[in-house]
Structures are given as C-alpha cells and as structure tokens.
Image: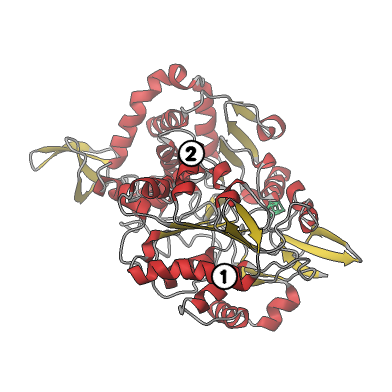
Amino acid sequence: MAFLRCYMCKNTCGIIATVEGKTVRVAPNKNHPQPGICGRGAAGPYLLTHPDRLRTPLIREGDSLVPTDWETALNEVVKRLKELLDEGHPEYLAITFHDYGKELLERFAALYGTPNLIGHESVCHGPRTVAARLVLGAEGPRSIDPDYPNSKFVVFIGRNPLEGIVPDIVRRIEEGRRKGMKIAVVDPRKSAIAQRYADRWIPIKPGTDTAFLLSVIYYMIKNKMYDEDFLRRYSNAGLLVHEDDLSPTNEYSDDLLYEGVKGGRRVATAFYLLMKEGEKVYPRLKMITGVDYDDVKYVAENLWDNRPTAVIDDGWHTSFSNDSTYTWMAAFIINAMIGNLDKKGGLVFAKRVRVKLYDENRAKVKRVDKVRYPLTEAAFQEVYRAVLTGTPYPIKALMVVGTNLDGRDPNSDMVRRALQALDFLVVVDIMPSDVTQYADVVLAESTYLERDELPLPVGWTLEPWIDVHQRAVDPLYDTKPLWWILFELERRLGLANDTFESVESEILQQLGISKEELYSRGSVKLNAELYEVYPYKRELSTPSGKVEVYSTLLYEYGY
Ligand code: SF4
C-alpha cells in the first residue's frame, strides 16, 4: 500500500492505492488531513491504461508528431531554450500550468531567468485572489478559508461546493451543519448546495453581486452592525480621504463615520465613503439585483447575530463579470465588519508553510501581463498578445504543462493563431489534447500512479500539514515525471545539477521534519497556532499591515 496524493485535479487529496496483479485501486486515505476521493479521483486508475495515453516523447517532423527517444526530445528543447539564453532574452520563454508542479516550475523559471510563469487565474479565481490581496494581504483560495466546522452561519456567493472541487470541504460543511450551521446561497440558479443545504436561497440577477453586498454593507452600517473596536484597531476604516479626488490623508478619525473639513478640503473616513457607495444602490436594490430587502436583512442579521462564528465564504470561480474584484472586496470587508478574521468559526488564515526552491528570479524585465495589468494574479491573454504583436516584448517560446489552452482560454481564434505563430512550443502532459497538435516537442509524463513526488504542504487545510506521494506501480511506458524532466533541462542548460534526493532533503530541511517520520506516517502536522494570529499578533501583508477598507494599492495604480 502506498501513500498518494490524487492528481486528477489540482487539489491533491490524500488517497491510498492498492495493486493486485494488473489492477490498481484507489481509495480515500482516512488518516490524511484532506482525504479524497471524488468521482473524478475514483476514475484515476483508468488513466494508466487509457488507449490514448502519450507513451513516448514526440517530436515534430513536418506536419506530424512522431515518437522519439528522451535524448533527442530533451536535446531539441535544450537547443531551442539555449538560443533564447544566448540572445540574452530568457523572458521570451513563457510557461503555463494549472497549479501542479508550481514549486518546481517557479524554480525552473527563476534559474532560467524568465518572469513569465503565468497560470490560469484570469479565467478562474483571479478577481477573488486580487481582492483578497488588496483587502487582507492574503493570496489564492488556499490562503484563507471559512472555518466551516465551527461556523454557525455561512453565505455562499455563486459557489457550489457540492458539485465542484475538494471533497473535504463538503465534509467540513457537513460537520458544521451537524452542529447547526445555517446556510444562505446567493446564486441565480438553484445549485445543489442551494437545493440541498440552503436555509435561504437568494436568487439574484447575474452580475449584480456587488450591488447586493454593498446593500448589505449599507444596511449593516445604518443599523450599527459593525465591530467598531476591530475596525479601529485592525483596519483603515477610519482613514480620512479627500472627497474631491479620493486621495488619502495620513490621518485617522476615531469616529468611523466622520465627514468634515480639514485644511480647507472636505474629507471623510473610508468607512463613511463605503456607506455612501451602499446608499447609491440600496434604494434600487430590487431593480438592480432582483433581491428582496428582506433577504438583505436576513443575511445582515444572521452575520451580525452569529459573529464571529459567521462568514461570507471566500468564493471560487469568480471571473463572472467586470466588477468581480469589487464583489470580493465587499465580501472581505463585511467579514472584517463582523470581526470574524482568524476567529474560530470565522474566516481563517491558513497557517500553511511554503516551500521555496530558488533564491531570486534572475529576470530583468516585468512579467509580460503585469505591464498592462500590474495588479493581476495572472492574465495569460497578454502572452497571446505578445506572441502576435511583439508588445510589450515578444514571446517566442512556450512551455505548457498539463493544461489545454484551447479549452482553457477564451477567444479560441486568438489562442490558435498565437500557438501557430510561436517559434517553439513544448508540451508536457499525460494525454494528448488540442494544444499538443501545435507542439514541436511533446514530453510524455508518467501518471501520478507511476511517479514519486516531492514532499509538499497539503493543499486545503487550515493547519500546516506536509504529505508524501509514492508511486503505486512502475511506469508502464517510456514516460518520465515532471521533476525529472525539469532537473534534466536544468542540468543540460547548465543552470543546476540537482536530483530528487537533493531537492527532497532541501524541502525537509526547510520544513524541519525528518524523512523517516514523514514517510512512516504519510503526513505530518507542524506546530502552529491556528486562531487569532492575523491581524492580532502579526500584521497583514497589505501596505498598511491592516485590513484595507480603502485600498492604497488601488489608489496608487489609479483605480
Ligand atoms: S478533488 Fe481530490 S479526489 Fe477529486 S480529483 Fe481532485 S484531487 Fe482527486
């Protein structure tokens, strides 16, 4: 029996695999802090013998991709990547992926010297993640999460955890429900969670979530439903802002709803200005959103009455409309208003550890998407633009790891034109997809059942867990793990000379755990305080170190 992570999606739930003859079975690892397994995960063993699998590396010969050996395939990739290095333009290489392999790809990009490791976030959780950074100094969806098992009231905005991603979140919601958690679901459609779990389903017109949340904010402020002490101490709600151009002063008011004149200019607190934004939409709530006033009252009162064990869920696929970032900024501000941050049953900062396998990225230019969108998490469309127009600088080569761009990104015509226009495209994958047909070289990867992986932090736990991943069977075909491919490229490009064992021991050293302990147990929890750390004992990673009701970054960038 081997300890595995399921790699059928990015969430890496804990599973075990058993092998009997030619049959591989996967099952939940009930001792893992994030046990699998969903339907997609259960289908994992079919990958092994799937008739369409990539069984060897492939190399382009005219219009066809033909099987080749690893030496030839890697030499071709190295030759093309070396050309860019010799030209002095490693930034002309972009790399894209879907979370899998992040630590190793970050390392490869840093050693090679390209800043252009860019993921899928603009078509996924990008707006939510930018909002989390602006308001809370947090990162992607794994960095903060509701403490579902201890929450008494949770509001889901357009999210349906019952039918999407991370079975352990469903388990945690179930645990909360057994203890009496109430749920409100704000969603135009009656999703599975609205149908099965919601105490109140609030159907809303698509694209109007921000107006709804601003109305909740307005109702709560008008009815004194906010934690004044928390906001004064840990947020910039009392920051005085010039009303004429919204520039910040350096002064704070103890009266969170102050408005007056300072130095001859009208000023108001950030919190007052937020209330005024709510006041603009609240009278037109029904017309804009289709939601009843009673629903606003229900959400506001339940959040307030159950504080701090109440929470607006931090959301997921939120690239829904052009104000999605503001939707999530409003949601995070409401969480701060009820003082639930890092409280048991509230919105908790995951105490995850980080693994970093490089010193500094040697890149000398900005990431290509950050030139136009400086605050973006990832805007891969800028890579296509750079390929097709050469601006802000050219992208000539692309490495695609385990993701199908034709299915992932909008504007298929542009995607295809860009893929055809590239000088060089290398794809690392297990199965062929639309994108492999454009490739110059395809590097056939072993499935997760056939490869070892490095120890890494567990994906979706609030506490810091580390786990291992061991192969269940030897590779059936002439395939290699991603780590092997990247270490080989690094070695052949003269960038590094690492092995699985050397990087593994570097990770164990960073995490401060012994290999024996980790491998004998499969997963290990590191010591960390779970609740009431941020922003009480440690500052947030916002410019002010506090919850930013007024985003200084947005002002700085002219938004
Ligand atoms: S959610 Fe977990 S079990 Fe399901 S496919 Fe993803 S990693 Fe596997």
The residue beneath circle 2 is 319
Give the number of marks.
2
Q: Quadrant of residue 273?
A: top left
| 1 or 2: mark nearer the eye | 1
* Image spot of residue 486 (x, y percent): 55, 70
Q: Secondary structure at mark 1?
A: helix
Is residue 251 depicted above or below 323 in this figure?
Answer: below
Q: Residue at left 38%, top 19%?
A: 283
Between 398 and 529, the one nearer to me in the picture: 398
In this view of the protein, which residue sits in the foreground, 23 or 173?
23
Instruction: State yes or no: discs 1 and 2 in contact (Cβ < 8 Å).
Output: no
Q: Is residue 254 above or below residue 243?
A: below
Q: Assign the C terminus to one quadrant of the image.
A: top left
The x, y position of residue 335, in whole percent, is 47, 44
| Secondary structure of residue under mark 2 | loop
The residue that appears at 41% across and 34% down in the rendered structure is 322
Q: Nearer the viewer, residue 216 or 553?
A: 553
Question: Image quadrant for the N terminus?
Answer: bottom right
Q: Does ligand 1 reach within 8 Å of label 2's beta carbon?
A: no
Amino acid bearing label 1 = Leu
Residue neighbourhood size for the residue with mark 2, other residues' Cα within 10 Å, grouped as few (<14), some (14–19), many (≥20): some
In the displayed structure, 389 sits above or below 356; it is: above
In the rendered structure, find residue 469 and report the number of the disc placed on it.
none
Q: Residue 522's x, y, as percent?
A: 72, 72
What colour scheme was applied to this rendering of the protein?
secondary structure
Q: Identify the residue at horizontal 73%, vertical 58% (top origin).
A: 35
Q: Residue at x 44, y 43 (%)?
A: 127
What label sits on residue 74 in the rendered view?
Answer: 1
